[in-house]
Amino acid sequence: MKKILLTVVIAIVFLAGYSPVVMAAEEGIRSSGGGNTTFFIVVVLVAGFGMAIAAIGAAFAQSNALKSALEGIARNPGASGQILTTMLVGLAMIESLAIYVLVIALILLYANPLIKYVVG
């Protein structure tokens, strides 16, 4: 229950941090004379939630990988070199998933391919 509450609080703080971006985008849209404010707000929220979920998932996966590697080294200290190498490769793969979400979020925020259907 505490983890869920902490996740909700983190999401609210994250969204509160994005509110100036949304307001600035809304003002820019009004001054340019076109566009759909709701679309841009949804894009910012989706990008924010996507990054939050990806960061939380990557953190849990990396902590589990590190815990398992340390348990393996504790059971067999002679295999620490192989375990360390395998763990680092696994951590890089886990982190790459979070980076892919970041790239998609940045594409949605700055180079959205659906913008031509909204602003016309």
Image (cartoon, rainbow, N blue to C red):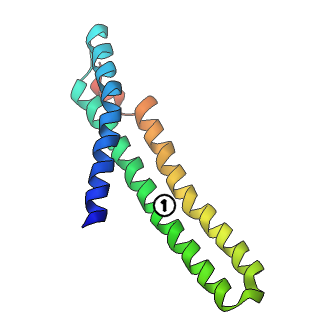
Residue at x 27% of width, y 31% of height:
41
- Under circle 1, the secondary element is helix
Residue 85, quarter of the rendered image = bottom right
Q: Where does the N terminus fall, quadrant-wise? A: bottom left
From the viewer's perspective, is 41 left or right of 51? left
The amino acid on which the numbered mark 1 sits, given as a three-letter code, is Ala
Q: Name the outermost residue toward the bottom.
A: 75
Number of marks drawn: 1
Q: Is residue 111 visible?
A: no
> Going 33% across and 49% down the picture, which residue do you hit?
10
Q: Quadrant location of the C terminus?
A: top left
| Category of crowding for the residue at label 1, using alpha-carbon neighbours closer than 10 angstroms: few (below 14), some (14–19), many (at least 20) | many
Residue 113: percent from left, percent from top = 41, 33
Residue 90 drawn above or below residue 105: below
Residue occupying the point 49% across, 45% down: 102
State left or right for residue 36 relative to residue 43.
Answer: left
Q: Quadrant of residue 21?
A: top left
Vertical placement of 107 versus 73: above or below?
above
Identify which residue, 86 or 30, lies in the foreground: 86
Residue at image point 35% right, 34% down: 17
Q: Position of residue 71 (x, y in %)?
A: 59, 84
Q: Is residue 81 visible?
A: yes
Give x and y (percent) for residue 46: 32, 43
Q: List the residue tagged with mark 1.
A: 58
Query: Which quadrant would residue 68 be assigned to in this image?
Result: bottom right
Q: Nearer the viewer, residue 112 or 12?
A: 12
Q: Give how far across and how far down residue 14 sits, in percent.
A: 35, 41
